Amino acid sequence: MYKLIKPLFFQFDPEKIHYFVTGSLKNAQKIWGLPALLKKVYGFNHPTLEKELFGLKFKNPVGLAAGFDKNGEYIEELANFGFGFIEVGTVTPLPQPGNDKPRMFRLQEDAALINRMGFNNKGVDVLARKLESVKRDGLIIGGNIGKNKNTPNEEAVNDYIKCFDRLFHVVDYFVVNVSSPNTPNLRALQEKEPLKHILNTLQQRNLKDGVSKPILLKIAPDLTDSQLDDIIEIVQETKIAGIIATNTTISRDGLQASTSLKNEMGGVSGKPVGKRSTEVIRYLSEKSNKAFPIIGVGGIHSAKDAKEKLEAGASLVQVYTGFVYEGPGLVKRILKGLVG
């Protein structure tokens, strides 16, 4: 079914059709019996898929990556497609419009997207209120947090604290995003000292009242081995829960799309980042002797892709661009492939 509809969807601007489809999905869910039908068609449960990680129980290891539902507006609707967990955000303390449009581009020859969204979101207060009313039904929800564009890096920790405090009681885990290429100078926060400062500060708040939430760090695929060694050291020193590997890449190596399209500013997601993402997962897993869990994301368009991430050392996986290209049946196909 999706193969028939996708060519029509792909005639429109990627961002506009995203909001049209998600908005239509939300309206359609009001039709009596449709949510139950979608769960029956797209859901897949098996005891071997259940996973306990970070002290949380995941009904399956396939999640939706951050960026798809920045403001937590479609969680219940998206959950009907079989996800074991959904990550919302990236959210910032204050609302911000993001970068100028157009800011998302399809590279169809590469099964990829380029985006330079720029952390467009309605702000942490709006997200927190949304999450307070979400019916979870066993769904794990993660909160991906960032800094506002106008906040200088020297003050970035304050933005992460504001998001952390506001979401603490409404998310199951946190993701510190310092790896998006679309906020000026954000990736500089991946350097050792500023990153340690942010993570240590969050951990101090995390542990102060005897109740804590898992904190993960999302990293770029463009880090060198030396930088990855630093990441391993930082994770172990700050005692955060784990890593999400990886965000989008600034590399354009091997892309088949037209020069004008592939040279658009922004991060590349989808199949072109798949190999590098798996390499990063394997390096972190082997070099750390599996000292911490890793969530693998980047270029997962099939059960085979998901298995590669898991075999490389990931404990869970996330999809985004693959979900766009392969359709809502992707999660079920991955889950059946993992069982079979």
Image: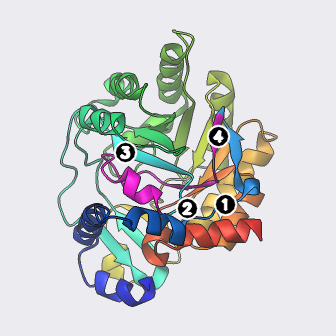
In this figure, which residue is indicated by the disc labeled 1? 278
- For marks 3 and 4, the one nearer the N-term is 4
**Type of amino acid at the residue the image marks with label 4:** Lys
- For marks 1 and 3, the one nearer the N-term is 3
- Dividing the image into 4 quarters, which one contains the N terminus? bottom left
Q: Are marks 1 and 2 in contact (CB under 8 Å)?
A: yes
What is the C-alpha distance between the residues marked 2 and 3? 17 Å
In this figure, which residue is indicated by the disc labeled 2? 298
- The image shows residue 118, relative to residue 22, as above or below, that is above
Q: Are marks 1 and 3 in contact (CB under 8 Å)?
A: no
Q: Can residue 300 be seen by looking at this rendering?
A: no
Q: Which mark is residue 89?
A: 3
In this figure, which residue is indicated by the disc labeled 4? 57
Label 2 packing within 10 angstroms: few (<14), some (14-19), many (20+): many
Query: Which residue extends farthest front?
Result: 32
Q: Can residue 227 be seen by looking at this rendering?
A: yes
